[in-house]
Image (cartoon, coloured by chain):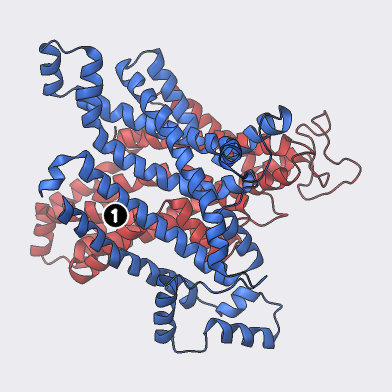
Amino acid sequence: MLPVIGARLLDAVPTVLLVLTLVFIALRLLPGDPALVALGDYATAEQLALFREQMGLNAPLWQQYFTFIWDMLTLDFGQSLIDRTPVLRLLADNLPYTIELTLVATGMGLLVGIPLGVVAAVNRNKLPDAGVRVFSLVGYAIPDFYLGALLLIVFALTLGWFPINGGGTGFVDRMYHVFLPAVTLAMVKTAFLGRLTRTSLLEVLGKDYIRTARAKGARENRVIYRHGLRNALLPITTGLGLSLLATLSGSVAIELVFNRPGIGEVLISAIAKRDYPVIQAGVVVFAFFVVLINLLVDLAYIVVDPRIRVK
Amino acid sequence: MTLATEQTHVLAPEGPRFGLLRSIILGQPSTIMATIIIAVFLAIAVLAPAIAPYDPLAQSYLAINAYPSAEHWLGTDQFGRDVLSRLIFGSRNSLIFGLISPTLAAIFGTALGVAAGYFGGIIDRLVTRIIDLLLAFPELLLAIMIAAVLGGGFWNVVAVITIAFVPGFARVARASTLAVKQEPYVEAAIAAGVTTPMIIARHVLPNISAPIVVLMTLWVASAIRLEASLSFLGIGTQPPNPSWGNIIRDGLGNIFGSPWPIIGAGFAITMVVLAFNLIGDAARDVLDPETAQ
């Protein structure tokens, strides 16, 4: 098992380098002067020159490339152009909120989505199945930020059950603050995971070994959970990875809706203020998380599917 | 001789094409509903100047944050602009992005995928590696990251959504091209001395079109959602130009004033995305039964 894990970890190294290269290409080689893009059309010549000097834009391109890769790998993200805060500090302060939101939302989505999918598959073409289908159709169509705004209006503004903004302090308060944003993201996830569970469980339930299990006289619950769901887990693991990624990208808008601190909020406000070092770091951090989540999904396969361990 | 038989093979889909379209649209009650919804929104977008009761940009400080009434069916926003008129004009943005971006992405993605699949070698390895990498990113996150670099504005948003969709098309086009390339009629065409561009145009493209078209219809909905998300984040369509996404953004800033802009714009996005999703699913079931669940 260990060599397989090691191979997967090694495989992530070129991916990270390629991601950084693409980010560099996007940031530096796009048409237009990065200084002009960063500071806007009204910047003076001195401001532009100072910016180029600070960002190392006067060096040859290959040198800039290696400096960039090195800086990113050593987490040297520079300072915010607006208030001189070290970007690393900004990220470290906000990252926990984004991770918290992503994890709580994904947990809620799993807890509701998988049982929902099982119910739909077991009652195929009956009322519960139709209910889950309608729920997932709407879940796919409704934008998460709209759902979030509706929940905010109803449960925070009108009923006053939940806070309107902020991230909270202390565990209980933070869970209280994260609840509505997490429910918003989880509802979209539930639609996706429920449908996925239904499809993969139905496929497994048609297999010969399920009939064998039933013929042996195994109880229906045991057939469904022990024989069925256990084998349906592989596609669900892929789905979970996709859902984690979607939750992470959805968190950007949700942080804005609920006025929560987080990486998405940092990136979006940096774009509005053209805070170039922060934008750069934010993009790299998101890219890093995408690579990390994909890596975790690969590792989860090894746990879920014993066949992979042998290869 | 080979070419003659090939021509009938390639031209065959021309006949029943309308039949296919009919079975997609009239296949189920839900797709009929979806078609009607899309038709209504298309009509609204085309006729916007004629049917909008007010100028979507006209401000009136006499009627700020008005609730729905006979004069303003969906009320007014914090600048006294008529919400319904803004939604009507906003539909133009959503539908234009929804139709342009998947089309452009299909063109570029197919070109890339066919080149990789048909020629193989180093082009293939490079394209595949980058596609796999980009596909690891959720479209929204990829779009946000590109928009972070490019900034907002109409053509930038078109570019952002297009780039976010290209990898998906390239992957499908490459896989289909690899399959078609093995077919005897392609070998026959090569043996008969048909030039490579001609083979691609007459034999490869027509035979990989079904999954590409399916993907395009499926992604109209995604494009509309993406534009709305980007505009909501302030990196898409720029105000005061109305877009369903930035109407919700404005509404959130004025949440104590009036909830109606948010409710109306969100409802419009949900309906249109739902309708295009249903059509996309139906198109997949009819055109590409193998991948249908």
Left or right side of B111 for A52: right
What type is the residue that disc 1 sits on? Arg
Q: Is residue A51 above or below residue A87?
A: below
Residue at screen point 56% across, 68% down: A87
Residue farthest to the right? B62
Quick one: A291 or B273, which is closer to the camera?
A291
Tally of numbered tags: 1
The image shows residue A284, relative to residue A225, as above or below, that is below
Q: Chain B is drawn in which colour?
A: red
Residue A205, picture quadrant: top left
Chain coloured blue here = A
Indicate the quadrant where residue B111 lies.
bottom left
Secondary element under disc 1, as helix, strand or loop, is: helix
Left or right: B5 as drawn, with respect to A155: left
**Residue placed under numbered mark 1 in the picture:** B171
Picture coordinates of residue B235, whole percent (x, y): 60, 58
- Residue at 47 percent of width and 48 percent of height: A248
Q: Mark 1 lies on which chain?
A: B
Q: Nearer the viewer, residue B28 or A156?
A: A156
Indicate whether B41 appears above or below A79.
above
- Disc 1 crowd rating (10 Å Cα; few below 14, some 14-19, many 20+) is many
Which quadrant holds residue B237? Answer: bottom right
Tell me which residue sits at (40%, 60%) in the image. Answer: A288
Q: Is residue A225 visible?
A: yes
From the viewer's side, name the closer residue of B180 and A246.
Answer: A246
> Could you say where residue B170 lies in the image, as x and y percent from the top left?
31, 57
Q: Which of B169 and A233 is in front in this view?
A: A233
Position of residue B229 measured from the top left corner of the image (x, y, whole percent) = 56, 48
